[in-house]
Image (cartoon, rainbow, N blue to C red):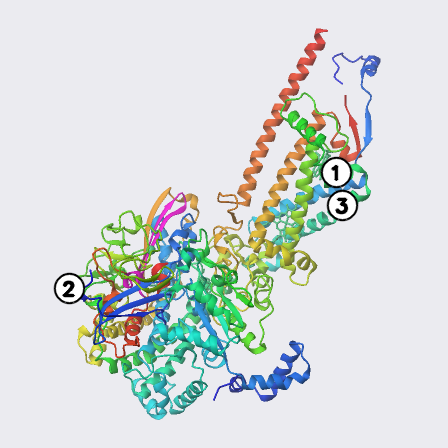
Amino acid sequence: MGAYETQGFKLDNSGKRMVVDPICRIEGHLRVEVNLDSNNVIRNAVSTGTMWRGLEVILKGRDPRDAWAFTERICGVCTGTHALTSVRAVEDALGIQIPENANTIRNLMQLNLYIHDHLVHFYHLHALDWVDVVSALSADPKRTSELAQSISNWPLSSPGYFRDLQNRLKKFVESGQLGPFMNGYWGNPAYKLPPEANLMAVAHYLEALDFQKEIVKVHTIFGGKNPHPNWLVGGVPCPINVHDTGAVGALNMERLNLVKSIIDRCKEFVEQVYIPDLLAIASFYKGWLYGGGLSSQNVLSYGDIPEKANDYSPANLLLPRGAIVGGDLKTVHPVDLKDPAQIQEFVSHSWYKYADESKGLHPFDGVTEPNYKPEGKNFKGTRTKIEQLDEEAKYSWLKAPRWKGHAMEVGCLSRMLLGYVQPKQYPFIKDTIDAVLKKLDVPVTALFSTLGRTAARGIETLYCADLQVRQFDKLMAAIKAGDTATANISKWDPATWPKQANGAGFTEAPRGALGHWIKIKDTKIDNYQCVVPTTWNGSPRDPKGQIGAFEASLMNTPLAKADQPLEILRTIHSFDPCLACSTH
Amino acid sequence: MTTHHAPSPTGVDDDAVARAPSLKSIYVYEAPVRLWHWVNALAIVVLAVSGYFIGSPPPSVPGEASDNFLFGYIRFAHFAAAYVFAVGFLARLYWGLVGNDHSRELFSIPVLTGAYWREIGAMLKWYAFLRPYPNRYVGHNPLARISMFFAIFLGGIFMLVTGFALYGEGAQAGHWSHTLFTSWVLPLFGQSQTLHTWHHLGMWMIVLFVMVHVYAAVREDIMGRQSMISTMLSGYRMFKK
Amino acid sequence: MTETFYEVLRRQGITRRSFIKFCSLTASSLGLGSTFVPKIAHALETKPRTPVIWLHGLECTCCSESFIRSAHPLTKDVVLSMLSLDYDDTLMAAAGHQAEAIIEEVKKKYKGNYIVAVEGNPPLNEDGMFCIHGGRPFVEVLKETCADAKAVISWGACASYGCVQAAKPNPTRATPVHQVISGKPIVRVPGCPPIAEVMTGVVTYMLTFDRIPELDRQGRPKMFYGQRIHDKCYRRPHFDAGQFVEQWDDDAARRGYCLYKMGCKGPTTYNACSTVRWNGGVSFPIQSGHGCIGCSEDGFWDKGSFYDRVTDIKQFGIESNADKVGGTAAAVVGAGIAVHAGLSALSRARINHSQENQQGGN
Ligand code: HEM
Ligand code: HEM
Ligand code: NFV
Ligand code: SF4
Ligand code: SF4
Ligand code: F3S
Ligand SMILES: [Mg+2]
């Protein structure tokens, strides 16, 4: 194919090939190859998932009630979201209705995951793409303090606080042992923050590191631990007892108070640290609006956070559901996980085998058969030493999911866009986005960018911090009204199950639309398929040559320094890739 | 011993007495063996029942935890019987050294003796109704011997080793059972859950043995050519016909 | 100037006096005489932070996620002051060539003096290409990196045992670290994931005492893996009493009775959850109402449903448990005995009858 056009992008693989492997500060193993033209602009992008574990193969023949634990281990970063998706799939298959409280507690855990995952992503996985740690050394602590106080009421903002921090940083740098900051791209002209903003960001990098461990305690209370809390088909495993003997062995007033204090602190931290930081950093980068990729054309969300239990219709979901295609923001298409013509996975460019690879398979009929084969006329290297991949052949451990044949972007930007275009149902999203755009003084189209994705994540975190408080209030109101049920056990015993049953479960994982499809036969799993957010975003090409969201987002981005992949990292990181998820 | 004559109303039947075979009896099972047999049998019953309940506990009891110790007692019964079983096993081993020839039969099988295997064949035919009568055996019959060797001698060792390895987990490092057993048995089985499963399977193996054993003992007593149950009580083997 | 271990301790409020006391404790625990105390003190006062290379194989990154949850010590103090986390895909600033260069540099500069921490494991099928790192099989990178290390830490169930990707049929042949690395001390810190404070506890032990912790036969630090969840479970009185949760969300569950009948694997799981607990001591699985699933045990994925007390046996090719196998065998044998007894009675009657006929014919 060489040079061709797809989805409005002109792909041209003739220039200098640059390989970035490993991409760090993500979950899992990802490789990116790009072709640069003579101006160091990316004209062709190739994204490759470089791991596979075979969970779909491993799940066959197992007890459906156990599947949540297996799928939860697909990823420890978005921990719990696969578990939730899995119990929903099993409940769908067996027709299990969960109690209201179970739904609320699940919502609380899911929202809590969002907040944790987004915060850690912003500060610990993404910030170093925007923040120059070394430049922070030359900041004036007093001016840093002024900056901090001008944007937020957060109390840790005195000149002395920033001076101590700077001294610690200095000592650290002078030791010559730079640890995780070693060989960073410090001083690259793509960094735009003044030293004071850098110092403030470094301070919050460390504060966020301290705080994130507090957030997850909500999971610990309801699920016993984090990462990888416990779940239950039919409800949640934690019983409620606020009145009676033995309450200390269950969810009691003390536990609920602990939850309350954590979710209040979450709201505080997001409002007073995360959002102000985000706005401050963004204000220096609003001239750099690359990386929109597919977001202005095709976005997809399954929606999540059902307000009432067992109702998964769009009207009942506090996170929006739907699809936008061809950039038509006026039309939100309904999404049906069970329609065989909507969601399909292709493997023509993936290291898997189908009987007919020109066709896609709906997950109910999904097949996962690995077939490692690095090949093609442009492939360089050997089977165990890949120097350059050929994107015209098979080149990734990710399958290529498509919705009605379209490559889709999923994730926080998709969700916020779908909320933005449905302001009646999602006024909070609409209003917050408008406020942010106004504050930064940029048009709506600025959302379709790397920065837009990063901002959407922050806006969503704010929304979730608010929802978390509201879901908690709902839980308390239900308990007050005397409802303490947390599990429905009527179909716990496999003897009560039909001989065969199919089900689909979904969540909006922090990284986007997540679906699990299960086929149960004789009380065992007959087929289990996961189509995962990073599989959508990191998708390789399909038989039509359409590129996925990662690849699209890199197109036409100039690099400030041809030997430093800073901009590539920045844009890829804005998706918060998770490769363990994507290939599973 | 069958008579088809109606007995004389006087109770005197000289004819029958003359035709009757002489009853011979041989002292086979010395007192320690007999004592051990019944103590051991009892211990195994307690172990199997308590062990089953350890795997599948009875319904919960109401009330304060501190007022109840049901599961504790079930486990205690298991461990107490386990010690009886263990001490008995060691004592029986000792008696195998100092007792009569029959006291050693439990601990070996004469694999190299062709005659032994022929007798096994003979016993199998007897159980398959291919022979009208079994042969006469003073000690254990060859089939009983081989099943006891595997189920009780080897099986007993297996249950002791796995049992005390499990026991040492609770008793913990420093306890003799941990040092002697847990320390090497646990790594050998890989992990504790697997060890539980094998110990549990061991129970069923012994249950099967007991079922067959008791059936065979009663049947031999009735249909065979020598006494059985009374032998395990008195020690004397009596031969009929 | 290098911030030394001594300075770290000082900054954390430890006095010079207790520092020296600590040195003499170290000396005696290493079996060294008091003359070594000044030498140890000197070493700690001047030596640079130990470099750590943290590698990722096939895994889910929950071990990293757990690690950053450490409350004491705080992760930032571990990373900034106690060790030098020179390579860690998940956190490091650099990528690609710039990242790869660090491994080479550490290997050269700190030959024999760095620690390799491994999260996840290498798959061996497809020549190792189920996990590719820099275009090469992860297993190669792992071997090369460990070659000059002082010690290796196997984080989590993945590195220690294989974990979920090694569950049957283990399509990638995911293999625990100790099966591909030899000749190095390897500390296994199992759990899926391990508890944060156990992870930082193991690391700080190694840095503080400059030796690997005492290990059990399975290579786990005795200090955290010497007892079962069940040995220190606060629900144990209900276990002994015979008070069990019989069904999810029943009254027993609301009173916090023992979860044994719901399949709790606490009695067969070695870990510190019931004592150290999770996320700063807030809770642990059992406290939140779900049984332990045995996540720090070898092959816990393949023992049958997490909700069955009597666990599955796969040894026989069929899927079953001891009671099903044993019960079926007992039923078959019982029926066999009944039939045999019946036939015996019949044959005996026939023989008697024929004898009678013979004798009667006389
Ligand atoms: C838990 C139950 C039992 C176990 C584990 C058991 C075990 C044994 C063992 C190990 C021997 C061999 C003794 C030796 O050579 O030292 C034996 C012999 C014998 N047992 Fe049992 N026994 C059990 C119950 C019974 C019962 C209920 C009876 C009677 C109905 C019985 C009758 C006999 C007889 C007759 C012998 C001698 C067998 C022969 O000489 O071939 N046993 N038993
Ligand atoms: C004929 C001999 C024995 C039988 C039939 C037997 C049977 C059983 C059974 C069925 C279990 C339950 C296993 C499970 O599912 O977890 C068990 C557990 C156990 N047995 Fe035995 N056992 C025997 C001998 C012993 C001996 C000699 C010991 C040594 C002390 C022993 C110690 C234990 C221990 C410690 C447990 C675990 C208890 C617990 O988990 O609380 N057993 N046994
Ligand atoms: N599902 C899932 Fe994921 C993905 N992709 C999610 O947010 O991270 Ni590990
Ligand atoms: S051991 Fe478990 S928690 Fe750690 S990386 Fe592996 S799957 Fe994740
Ligand atoms: S809940 Fe589990 S660990 Fe705790 S006592 Fe019961 S069986 Fe043991
Ligand atoms: S499931 Fe794992 S977290 Fe602890 S309580 Fe059991 S070892
Ligand atoms: Mg899949």
Q: Is residue A559 above or below residue B222?
A: below
* Quarter in which the C terminus of chain C is drawn: top right
* Front position in the image: C114 or C120: C114
Numbered range of the magenta stretch: A511-539
Q: Which residue is mark 1?
A: B105
Q: Amino acid at mark 1?
A: Glu
For the residue pair C101 and A110, the one nearer the viewer reads as: C101
Residue C273, labelled with which disc? none
Q: Tell me the distance, in whole angstroms, between the alpha carbons under discs 3 and 2.
A: 89 Å
- Three-letter residue code for mark 2: Lys
Q: Is label 3 in a helix, a strand or a loop?
A: helix
User: Front-most of C253 and A214?
Assistant: A214
Quadrant of res B140: top right
Ligand 1 contact, mark 3 (Cβ < 8 Å): no
Q: Which residue is mark 3?
A: B93
Q: Does residue A307 appear left or right of residue A485 in this picture? A: left
